[in-house]
Amino acid sequence: MPATVDEKRAFQMVMELMAIPGVSGREGAVAAYITSKLRAAGAPASAIRSDKAHKKTPLPGEVGNLVFQMPGTVRRARRLLMAHLDTVPICVGAKPVRKGELVRSADPKTGLGADDRSGVAVVLNTALEILRRKLPHPPLTFFWPIQEEVGLHGARHVQLSLLAKPRLAFNWDGGAAEKVTVAATGGYRLQIEIDGLAAHAGGAPEKGVSAIAIASLAIAQLVRDGWHGLIEKGNHRGTSNVGYIHGGEATNVITDHVELKAEARSHDREFRKQIVGVIEQAFTDAASRICNTDGKCGKVRFHARNDYEAFKLAGDEPSVLAAERAVRAVGLVPERAVSNGGLDANWMTAHGIPTVTLGCGQMQIHTTSEYLDIPAFQRACKIALELATETA
Ligand SMILES: [Zn+2]
């Protein structure tokens, strides 16, 4: 028998959750909403806990990760269900309205925040259904991490002891309900500072070293050699992007400082490192080619940080097989997917908790056209309950 859920109640809850503002670092109101719903359904206060992840993240936050633990009614491996609390800034002020089978924000200037409040609702609804109906279940951990959108920081800094060593783990974040994401790329974040020499652009340009010229040469070389944007070298694949460039104040001064931010991604760890190396080399080379008449050239300070490691779950990983069984149990055909973006699952898997990511109906995320597909959300609620109550 496939799991049944109170669809009306679940829908009402996702509508309420999407209306709560809560960008990364300001997840307090969302966490309070979840806590009050759990308490009202009979969850003991001692089972609802939070960690201090927000003290370890670069962005100072209001609250830590939220965790609710349930001892099992049957002796089986512990399962974890999770979805991130935060939304991107474009979603602040969202006014969710239903139009047929979809929900959009009534305000055309905001996104909806279904990323990831639909996931938050799926996970919370599962806990509430079990509490209210006293359904049999394995030991469960419900986990709502903070600050996913700004670099997966909640999942990265989670206090692992609160999660109580789950063997299987499921994360709801994005797309169709039958999508089972089993792998995701890894990514570096790069910070590049170029120092040149200031000089009067009309009076003594030959005495200056233009940081803008250095940045331009470096980027031009990366583009020309196929190391910017989509990167395909032999059978290696990756991407890179210079996404931020800032420098200069006036046309009559040779610019002595430019700051850039860039990223590099690949599922292949070694190739990802190679992309970073090529980018660094391009800037270093460019700096050595722009020199003044005294022989002084530019300087580059390059900082690269591996933001999240790529992962790929085995085809017979218990989390993968359970997710696919649950998708089939609600009458859908599971679709294995690979993500070219980082997910909280990257950090969970790095922590030794192999985590599958499933969809929960949010579409065109991070844009003002974001919408929630209500039937997909309802199916995700059933799949989650199926996963949380599989006792055979
Ligand atoms: Zn998300």
Image: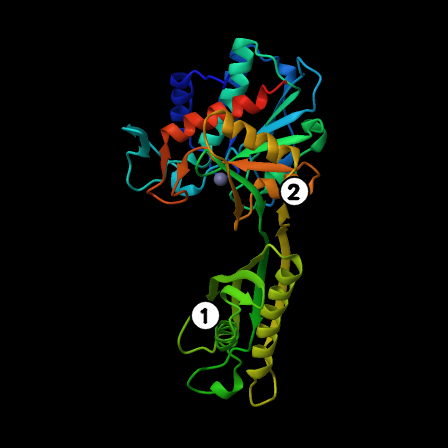
- Amino acid at circle 2: Ala
Q: Position of residue 62 (x, y in %)?
A: 55, 33
* Camera-nearest residue between 252 and 164: 164
- Is the C-beta separation of discs 1 and 2 under 8 Å? no
Residue located at (67% from left, 16% from top) = 72
In this rendered view, identify the residue nearer to me: 361 or 197: 361
Residue 303 percent coordinates (x, y): 63, 62
The type of colouring in the image is: rainbow
**Front disc: 1 or 2:** 2
Separation (CA) of disc 1 from disc 2: 50 Å
Residue at x 64%, y 56% (from the top left corner): 305
Three-letter amino acid code at disc 1? Gly
**Which quadrant would residue 95 be assigned to in this image?**
top left
* Screen quadrant of the C terminus: top right
Name the residue at the bottom extreme: 293
Choose the circle earlier in sequence order: 1 or 2.
Answer: 1
Q: Name the residue under label 1.
A: 248
Q: What element carries label 1?
A: loop
**Circle 1 Cα neighbour tier, 10 Å, few/some/many (<14 / 14–19 / ≥20):** some
Location of residue 29 with respect to 226 vertically, above or below: above
Looking at the rendered structure, the number of numbered marks drawn on it comes to 2
Residue matched to label 2? 314
Question: On screen, 61 above or below 221?
Answer: above
Instruction: Count residues near mark 2 (Cα–Cα under 10 Å), then give few for <14, some for 14-19, many for 20+.
Output: few
In which quarter of the view is residue 63 placed?
top right
